[in-house]
Each structure stands twice: as C-alpha cells, then as structure tokens.
Amino acid sequence: MDINQLSCFISVAQTLNFSEAARRNYVSQSSVSRYISDLEKEFGVKLFTRSHRDVVITNEGKTLLPYAIEIVNTIGKAKTIINQLKNGGRGKITLGCDITSVWFPSKCVSDFRKKYPDITIELKTFEAADRSQGITGGEYDFCFMPRDMVPENSEIEMMVTHTEPLVAVTEKGGFKNGKSVNPVQLADKKLVLLSESVAPIVYMEIVDLLRTFHVSPETDSSYNELAPLYIAVSSGLGISVLPRSLAELSCGAYADLISFGEADTGIAYAAVWSKSISNPVAELFIKTIKQHAHGDDSIYEI
C-alpha cells in the first residue's frame, strides 16, 4: 500500500468516476484502475462495484475511506513540517485566494510579512472546484473566498472577514451622472462579466441584482480572466460589475467605478482553514486574520 494508491482511492470514492480521479491525481485511468485493484487484493475485498455506466462504492470501501483520508492528510502534514525544518525552521504558509478575494488577504499578508519576515508566504489561485479537498487535504493552509462558497464540512473552520459592495465599472465618462447609478440604468447597456465558473457567487449576486430591478441587459459572461475583462471595459465594449476592491485593483486607473447607491449589493467574504491544521506557523496567521476581521458589519470602503 502506498500514498498514490490511497489518494486515487479517495478520489474515486468522492467522484465515483475513474477518469475524473485520474485527472485529479495527474495519472492515467489505467493507473487508477491498477491502484484500486492492488488495494482490493491487499484487503481481500471489493472496494467498488463497476459496470459500463456506474461506479458504486461498497460498504468495505466506505469503511476504508475515512482512514485513507486521515493517512493522506497526516503524510501531507508531515511533509510540510519536514520541509520547514529543512528550510531552517523559518516556516511557510500557503494561501489560496479566489479570483475576487483581494482586499482582506492583502491586508493580512502585508501585516504578517512585516511581523514575520522570515516566514515564506506562497499565494495561489483557489479554484471553485474541489474546495473541501483543497482546504482539508493540505494543499492550502488558509483560503479566502465569498462566504457562500465555503463548503459544508465539519472539518473546516470559517471566519467572516468583511462585506464588500459591488460597483459598476465603465470606461472613463461612461456615466455622466457622477458616482452613483441605479441598476435600472443598466437595462440598455451591454454587460461584460466574470464567468459563473470562476466567480460563481459574484455572478449570482449580479443576476439577483438585475432580477430585483427587473432589468435584462445584454450580457457576455465568457470572461475567465481579469486582463481581457479590463480591456473590454476600458475600451468601451461594455460595463462590468465587480467587488469594489477587485475593481480598484484591475480597472481603477483607466475606468470609472460607480456605486449602486442604496441597492443592497454586499457580498460577505470569509477566511477558511482546516480544523486539524498542523502547520507550526498557522496560529500566528490565525491571529492576524482575527486582528483584521470584522465580520458582516465591516463594509469595505475606499
């Protein structure tokens, strides 16, 4: 039995799909099948029943699953600690941020770096898929995302950090009436938005906003990255709607940021980590999060 066998077993158990398990573990589907077969031989039981269309985990497979997860997680934590010792004991934390999380993690990283300059901070993009596994499986020490993206998992700790409003983002002079716009005024405009796949909560909040004001503008939500979205907005191809801090970062210099006035557009953001996190420097970063988090009552402002 080895870690690759257990990792592939966990993926098959969670997805009930051998090809998806292969994709997650960066191996061929035949390798996944061989790993599962080897485990079944070692335990002397069937872990899955398979047909041409379905994969079903057996009772024996269900029994093995929590132990396999615990073993894989423990080995991952051990590797983290050993690597830190190898690097002189200074420590390292890995942060995952979804594409719309900017303001709060920036505050935390800036503060933490000043207090602990010898601790390495690695930043990664946190994908919407596989959220539970990413948080509890050791890939990230801490993740930042909209609260409604946080997976329901008893092994996950969450702290709401702040609430951030949406703003309309237009080319310079796109709206002549100043710093506020009524959502109704978007009815005859073209919207260019981050796609639902990369920013699901922001996308749903925008849809709810438009539905509340009974407007259905032409919408292009095919943008998976900020650079082409910025070009589209600044060149007048359309108006975007983004969380304020993200709009300031990506478009603020060459576009107008316009609030929605009294319309409720607040999105709650959260910091998330595994309850069983064993990274020695994790407690230091948790203190930084708690220092800057103000929950739902804290509204991001310029």
Image (cartoon, helix red, strand yellow):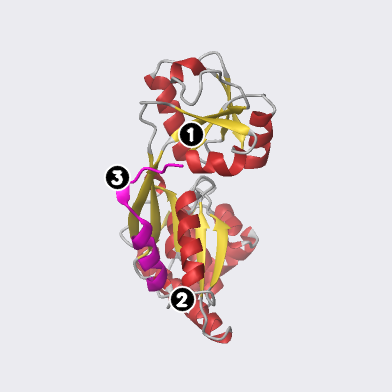
Count residues near mark 1 (Cα–Cα under 10 Å), then give few for <14, some for 14-19, many for 20+.
some
State how far apart marks 3 and 2 are (Cα).
Answer: 35 Å
Determine the CA span between mark 1 and mark 2.
35 Å
Question: What element does badge 2 sit on?
Answer: helix
Residue assigned mark 1:
203
Residue bearing mark 2: 77
For image coordinates 59% across by 58% down, the residue present is 22
> If you read the primary sequence from the N terminus, does the residue marked by circle 3 or circle 2 appear first?
2
Q: Are marks 1 and 3 in contact (CB under 8 Å)?
A: no
> Residue 261: horizontal and vertical position, in percent?
40, 26
Q: Are marks 1 and 2 in contact (CB under 8 Å)?
A: no
So how many labels did they put on this image?
Answer: 3
Q: Which numbered disc flags the more N-terminal residue, 1 or 2? A: 2
Nearer to us in this view, 200 or 233: 233
Magenta-span inclusion, residue 248? no
Which amino acid, by three-letter code, is at mark 1? Answer: Tyr
**Residue hosting label 3:** 297
Packing grade of label 3 (10 A; few <14, some 14-19, many >=20) is: few
Secondary structure mostly taken by the magenta-highlighted segment of the chain: helix
x, y (%) of residue 250?
60, 42
Residue that protrudes farthest toward the front in the picture: 178
Callout 3: SS: helix
Task: Report the magenta residues as a range.
Answer: 283-302
Q: Is residue 288 magenta?
A: yes
